[in-house]
Image (cartoon, grey):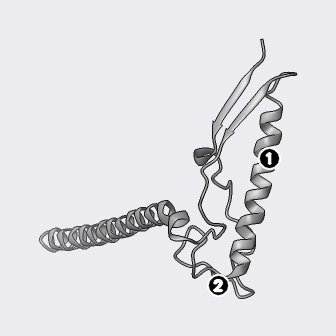
Amino acid sequence: MKNILIFNLKLVLLICKVPCGLEDESGRALNKGKIYISKSSPECVLEAYSQQFKNDFSLFLASRSHEMVTGGRMVLSFMGRTTIDPTSDHSCYQWELLARSLMAMVSQVRQNQTFFTENQRRRTDEKRVVAGCSGRGKG
């Protein structure tokens, strides 16, 4: 019996790591505030993401090839786009939604961290006051 592997690459082909070359010489982010290639991204960011995609897709295919049997088949389903421009609104819509959601989550975590830090500081101060008051009464 031959095996058939079917993959929907819309889900599979997220890059495995942040591409190299997304910072300038001083370590400043070239694509600050974005998790994807956008209209404001410099050309080097597009090239970095393209190279990372090529590396990851090659690794994906090499890894899947080990799962294949002689004569087996692999079906790959790709999401297409109507333009070659990877920064078009149609191409970036889902990434913009994801980016906004992630940024909102990060903001919420930061707010929670600030809230918990302030509460912890207040409790520590209250314990000091209580300890100081109870210590004075025993003299």
Q: In the visual, does 125 lie left or right of 91?
A: left
**Residue 129, position as x, y percentages in the image:** 19, 74
Residue 56 image position (x, y, % from top left): 75, 52
* Image quadrant in which you'd find residue 102: bottom left
Q: Determine the image quadrant of residue 23.
A: bottom right
| Amino acid at circle 2 | Arg
Please give the residue where the numbered disc 1 appears in the rendered image. 59
Evaluate if marks 1 and 2 touch, with contact meaning CB atoms under 8 Å apart: no
Q: Name the amino acid type tagged 1.
A: Leu
Residue 28, compared with residue 94, is above or below; it is: below
Residue depicted at 74% across the width and 70% down the height: 48
Judged left or right of residue 22, residue 8 is: left
Residue 50: image location, x then y, percent: 74, 65
Q: Describe residue 4's horizontal placement relative to residue 14 as left or right.
A: right
Q: Is residue 116 above or below residue 67?
A: below
Q: Foreground: 69 or 22?
A: 69
Question: To which residue does mark 2 refer?
Answer: 28
